[in-house]
Image (tube, rainbow, N blue to C red):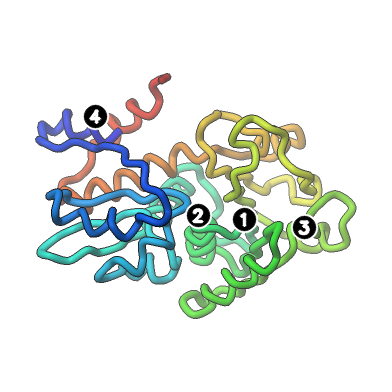
Amino acid sequence: MHNAAFRALDLPWAYLAFAVPGERVGEAVAAVPALGLVGLNVTIPHKQAVIPHLDKLSRRALACGAVNTIVYRRGVLRGENTDVIGLERDWGELGVEPRLRDSVVLGAGGSARAVAVALAARSRRVIVAARRPERAEALVRDLRKSVATKLEAIDLAELTPGAGDAESVLGRAGLVVNATSAGMKGEPFFGFAFGATPRSCFFYDLIYTARRTPFLAAAARLRRPGSNGLGMLLHQGAAAFEIWTGVSPPLDVMRRALSRKP
């Protein structure tokens, strides 16, 4: 989508992918000035690992404790988190209720941090559920420093069908977001008490490789609305494009590029 946007605006830029092993993240970031790069996107599992190698962080990146976009300007490497922007804009387009009582994020990695920050702006309470509850607790501890919304951590096992907390936790949920990799390869989604949510609860999957992921298919069987993360991918990319270039992104061009079959 970035290269399509560069062509549409006749900008002499190129967007390329680099495979970087974890132990060489610092070297990769240090190479940005040397190679004359304007910036980078950072994907899993490096969204937190890049932070010590940057000069500045935006307010969003500080709140998330994770970076997905780097810009190099005037000798300064600055980290941003456009995942938050992408989520906010996509939920707005999808008509997700802007004032929720409760919302739930499944997972506690770098992507889940951005989801939790975005949810905190529209929810009275955000529940973070993870298979490793200590990771959910650590995420909640970190985010309490930067968001005013009530945050709670829970073991994901407590949200399976028949579990003691499933009804009480999910009964007021207006939005449930899958920020795990479960279902990315088409495998069935792990046991989750979809039926404990209200009929109006919206299910959102960050995975965008399928129109209806296993997570969304399970929700749809119970007539719950939902969407994959393709719109978030578009809007976070558009935000990064504008940060790098200073030019308004051609959204329609980028959207068409994302919709093309590989």
Are circles 3 and 1 on residues that touch, CB within 8 Å? no
Q: Secondary structure under badge 2?
A: helix
| Three-letter code, disc 3 | Gly
Q: Which residue is mark 2?
A: 111
In this picture, is 134 found above or below 256?
below
- The amino acid type of the residue labelled 1 equals Gly
The first of marks 3 and 1 along the sequence is: 1
The disc placed on residue 171 is: 3
Are the residues flagged by discs 2 and 1 in contact, CB closer than 8 Å?
yes
At 55% from the left and 29% from the top, the residue drawn is 210
Farthest residue in the top direction?
261
Position of residue 207 measured from the top left corner of the image (x, y, whole percent):
54, 39
Instruction: Tell which of 100 and 88 is nearer to you.
Output: 88
Q: Are marks 4 and 1 in contact (CB under 8 Å)?
A: no
**Please, is residue 183 above or below residue 245 in the view?**
above
- Residue 248, horizontal then vertical, whole percent: 19, 45
Q: Nearer the viewer, residue 256 or 3?
A: 3
